[in-house]
């Protein structure tokens, strides 16, 4: 809305045009400022909620999240333009222009609790292997990912399966787990780690009499079909993309039969297991490793981080002497180091007051980069866990002129 007020009987068209031009310039500037400010506020709010819920998990309290479903910001622009005689006295018909204006903002923010059966199930459902591989393809550190996302490492030893838990209270299991992920990290540092799906071809033989002409056309859309020499049967072939396998060699160098066998073994495990096969003869082969990492739920991640602040603190574990050197020489004690203090830290990236203390991410020292990446991964994992927040039908941002 633009209000042009003429303050002198002698109207000036240039003054009116200038007022209109000013309103057009203010609109995009105000819009840009509003979008950036609201975006920053929502990101800060979610970051603080993550810290609050880690604090709640530390004291075994229920976790809870709240989201912003809509922001409707209406801007009211009011401009005035006019002319007046000069204040220095009578100077004939010389007039001075006068311009004034104001901007009013009326935001309407819809805040809804993130709750219900569907959200709770997603919080408690273990993360799937494709989530980990998606983050790996963004060049995330595999030791950071597994320390945050994995519940345990299951190794096949002497015909039986042994579980090594990623929990400091299980000393033997925790140290074995930490050495295993450090070993994978050392292979990744040398660009020799693969996390690829097993691709192979499956074949079927069916009698020619079992296929009608319509059925033959339907099969051609999904299978490669060839008639056998006797003319009494057909061979169907189909390319299969199987489970993900973490290796220190290229899985495509394996024979089709071996790839099919590895996939058949992996299919026996749930979708939150990701198989690892580190073999001799390749980088890192001095420490062969074959088993499965079992991923945990987002709720379990919060519990793990909360426990590390009190009842189950993490501790330093050296890498296995058989592992290649870790190029970055990073092996922090904590998966995510948080600072808990009685007063607000001055230079923390994110800080929240909860349980009578200030919680913030440690952003100083040798492992500052690691901590920032760990918190960013936690943020991304939460975004991949929640469902879309219901919208109320309000417009996003509207500007009235």
Image (tube, rainbow, N blue to C red):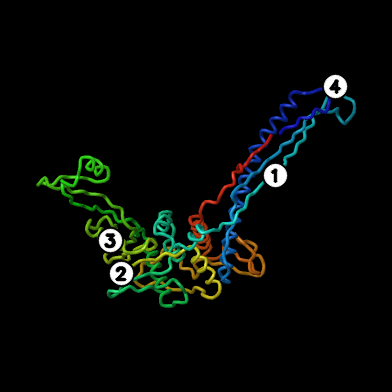
Q: Secondary structure at mark 1?
A: strand
Q: Is residue 66 above or below residue 326?
A: above
Residue 255: x, y in percent? 22, 57
Percent position (x, y) of residue 265?
28, 63
**Residue visible at 43% across and 54% down in the picture:** 138
Q: Which numbered mark, 4 or 1, is in the foreground of this view?
A: 1
Q: Which numbered disc flags the more N-terminal residue, 4 or 2?
A: 4
Q: Residue at x 59, y 60 (%)?
A: 49
Q: Residues within 10 Å of mark 1 (few under 14, many from 20)?
A: few
Locate the C terminus and report the quarter of the image it occupies: top right
Residue 373 lies, in percent from the top left, at 50, 59
Find disc 1 in the rendering and name its residue. 106
Front-most of residues 136 and 327: 136
Of the two numbered discs 1 and 3 on the same chain, state the one appearing first in sequence. 1
Quarter of the image holding residue 184? Answer: bottom left
For label 2, the residue is: 286
Mark 4 and mark 3: span between their CA atoms?
95 Å
In front: 82, or 224?
224
Which sits earlier in the primary sequence, circle 4 or circle 3? Answer: 4
Q: Which residue is mark 3?
A: 264
Quadrant in which residue 186 is drawn: bottom left
Q: Look at the numbered discs 1 and 3 and tell me whether their residues touch, using CB distance below 8 Å.
A: no
Q: Nearer the viewer, mark 2 or mark 3?
A: 3
Question: Which is nearer the eye, 62 or 177?
Answer: 62
- Return the x and y of residue 188 as percentages of the image width and height: 38, 61
Query: Upstream in the sequence, badge 2 or badge 3?
Result: 3
Contact (Cβ within 8 Å) of mark 1 with mark 2: no
- Which quadrant of the figure contains the N terminus? top right
- Going from N to C along the chain, the mark reached first, 4 or 1, is 4
Which of the labelled discs sits on residue 93, or is there none?
4
């Amino acid at each position: 809305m633009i209000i042009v007020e003429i303050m002198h009987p002698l109207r000036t068209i240039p003054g009116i045009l200038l007022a209109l031009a000013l309103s057009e310039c203010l609109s995009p500037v105000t819009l840009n400022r509003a979008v950036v400010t609201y975006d920053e506020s929502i990101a800060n709010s979610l970051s603080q909620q993550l810290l609050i819920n880690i604090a709640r998990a530390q004291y075994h309290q229920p976790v809870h999240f709240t989201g912003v479903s809509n922001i409707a910001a209406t801007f009211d622009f009011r401009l005035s333009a006019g002319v007046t005689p000069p204040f220095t006295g009578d100077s004939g018909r010389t007039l001075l222009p006068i311009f004034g204006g104001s901007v009013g903002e009326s935001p309407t923010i819809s805040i809804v609790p993130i709750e219900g059966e569907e959200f709770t199930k997603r919080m408690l459902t273990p993360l799937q292997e494709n989530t980990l591989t998606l983050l790996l393809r963004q060049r995330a550190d595999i030791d950071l990912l597994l320390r945050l996302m994995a519940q345990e490492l299951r190794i096949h030893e002497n015909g039986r399966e042994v579980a090594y838990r990623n929990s400091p209270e299980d000393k033997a299991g925790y140290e074995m787990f930490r050495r295993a992920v450090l070993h994978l990290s050392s292979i990744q540092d040398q660009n020799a780690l693969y996390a690829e799906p097993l691709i192979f071809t499956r074949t079927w033989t069916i009698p020619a009499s079992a296929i009608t002409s319509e059925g033959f056309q339907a099969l051609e859309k999904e299978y490669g079909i060839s008639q056998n020499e006797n003319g009494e049967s057909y061979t169907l072939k189909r390319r299969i993309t199987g489970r993900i396998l973490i290796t220190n060699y290229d899985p495509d160098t394996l024979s089709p039969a071996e790839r099919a066998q590895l996939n058949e073994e992996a299919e026996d495990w749930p979708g939150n297991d990701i198989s690892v096969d580190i073999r001799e003869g390749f980088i890192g082969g001095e420490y062969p490793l074959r088993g499965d990492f079992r991923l945990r739920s987002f709720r379990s991640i919060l519990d793990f981080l909360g426990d590390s602040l009190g009842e189950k603190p993490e501790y330093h574990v050296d890498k296995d002497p058989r592992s290649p050197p870790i190029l970055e020489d990073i092996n922090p004690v904590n998966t995510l180091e948080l600072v808990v203090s009685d007063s607000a830290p001055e230079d923390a990236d994110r800080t929240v007051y909860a349980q009578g203390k200030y919680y913030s991410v440690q952003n100083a020292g040798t492992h500052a980069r690691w901590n920032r990446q760990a918190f960013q991964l936690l943020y991304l994992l939460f975004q991949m866990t929640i469902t879309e927040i219901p919208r109320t039908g309000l417009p996003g941002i509207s500007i009235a002129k």
